[in-house]
Amino acid sequence: MAWSWRLEKADGRPVGVVEETFTTQADAESWLGENWRGLRDEGADQVTLLDGESTIYGPMSLHDPE
């Protein structure tokens, strides 16, 4: 399967999927570690990690805890 990130608003509405897919969970997580601020700046509030169509974990906030 291919790993990917689903981008969501805070209420869970999807706002897109990261175009890039990854061959491993570690690659997907490393990519997010490098790009989460840009995703947040573009309007995503949280992300969910997918393996194919299966949700692995999430939603995970892209904002600092208050």
Image (spheres, rainbow, N blue to C red):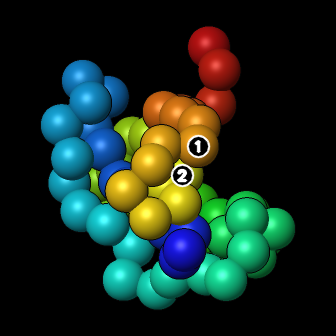
Check disc 2 and give the amino acid type: Leu
Marks 1,2: beta carbons within 8 A: yes
Residue in the picture at 20% in, 54% down: 15
Distance in Å between CA atoms under marks 1 and 2: 6 Å
Disc 1 secondary structure class = strand
Residue 17 horizontal/vertical position (percent): 32, 66
As displayed, is residue 29 above or below residue 61?
Answer: below
Residue closest to the eye, 54 or 33: 54
Residue located at (53% from left, 60% from top): 51
Q: Is residue 1 above or below residue 63?
A: below
Q: Nearest to the eye among marks 1 and 2: give it.
A: 1
Going 48% across and 33% down the picture, which residue do you hit?
A: 59
Q: Is residue 21 left or right of residue 25?
A: left
The three-letter code of the residue at mark 1 reads Ile
The x and y percentages for residue 3 are 56, 69
Could you tell whether 35 is left or right of 20 in the image? right
Q: Nearer the viewer, residue 54 or 16?
A: 54
Can the viewer see residue 63?
Answer: no
Bin the neighbour count of mark 1 within 10 Å (Cα to Cα): few under 14, some 14-19, many 20 and up. Answer: few
Q: Identify the residue at the far front of this view.
A: 1
Q: Dividing the image into 4 quarters, which one contains the C terminus?
A: top right
Residue 61 image position (x, y, % from top left): 53, 34
Per the image, the residue denoted by label 1 is 56
Q: How many marks?
A: 2
Q: Position of residue 8 (x, y in %)?
A: 31, 44
Q: Is 46 or 48 nearer to us in this picture?
A: 48
Res. 28 mark: none
Asked if one can make out residue 4 in the rendered structure from this viewpoint, the answer is yes
> Would you identify the image quadrant in which residue 25 lies?
bottom right
Q: Mark 2 points at which residue?
A: 49
Whether 17 is drawn above or below 44: the answer is below
